[in-house]
Image (tube, rainbow, N blue to C red):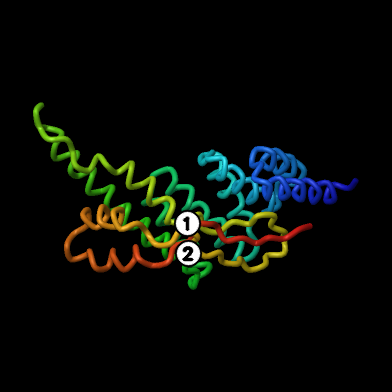
Amino acid sequence: MSGQEKYRTLVYEGNRKFDGKDYDGASSRYMEAVKSNEKDFTAHYNLGNALYKSKKYEEAKEEFEKASKLSQTLPDAAAALHNLGNTYMQMNQPEKAADYYKQSLKQDPYNEATRKNYEIAKLKEKEKQQQEKNKKNNSGKGGGNEPDKNNDQKGDQKDLKQDQGSGQQNEGKSDQGDTPKQKPNEEGKIPKDLENAILDKVNEKEKETARRILNKDSYSMPQSNEKDW
């Protein structure tokens, strides 16, 4: 079997395991494919997707970074950058997520999933900055103070992740650079109690803008380039 045939076979096997939700098995096949051909976008990108699904975000980030550097088409570049944004959101680094979503939008300006996630990342970045400011202001106070009201961030972040969408993902991506298909939100709009919790943390003059953003249709599942070898 030639090197290219071996590579294609390993990616194909990884795709089948990914489709069956065996993400560890898929990762193993994609890793073998990477060893067979380290310079191809597909294996790195699909490996990043499998690691992301396994919640191994640090490792997924490294693969998406490699994929973005190896991308040769605008859709591939936009997809890799978008998924870097998703990964940083999962790692609670909205400022970096927003930057990668912005870079992705430069490659694909009309992608609504990316734009929605960018706006949510900016809201979370502002919320995080406000919490750090409140924490700093309260750091010099003695005991007996009321608990920091912003300590509910963890719960809000968990709920928000479900609505921010996983973004773009190639499940069994070939190297032909086809345009991603959009999958609509399966969970509906953001819950009212979560919306109110986030709105309470932004300035009054920004509430209407935030409400408009949060009530847009979101993408609970990633976009996909489903392609068999």
Q: Is residue 126 left or right of residue 13?
A: left
| Position above or below: 99 against 48 | below
Judged from the image, the secondary structure of the residue bearing numbered disc 2 is: helix
Relative depth, front residue between 130 and 2? 130
Q: Please, what secondary structure does the residue beneath circle 1 have? A: loop
Residue hosting label 1: 165
Q: Amino acid at mark 1?
A: Gly
The tag on residue 17 is: none
Tell me residue 91's x, y (percent).
Answer: 43, 43
Asked if residue 101 lies left or right of residue 9, the reply is left
Asked if 153 appears above or below 117 in the picture, the reply is: above
Q: Residue visible at 72% across and 60% down? A: 227
197 relative to 74, above or below? above
Q: Residue, x 38% and y 52% (percent of image)?
A: 160
Mark 1 and mark 2 in contact? Answer it, CB < 8 Å.
Answer: yes
Residue farthest toward the right in the current orientation of the protein: 1
Residue positioned most to the top: 143
Three-letter residue code for mark 2: Ala
In the image, taking residue 14 as reference, residue 78 lies left or right, namely: left
The quarter of the image holding the C terminus is bottom right
**Which residue is tagged 2?**
113
Expressed as whole percent of the image width and height from the top left, the position of residue 181 reads 60, 67
Q: Which residue appears at 17% of the width and 62% of the height?
A: 204
Disc on the earlier residue, 1 or 2: 2
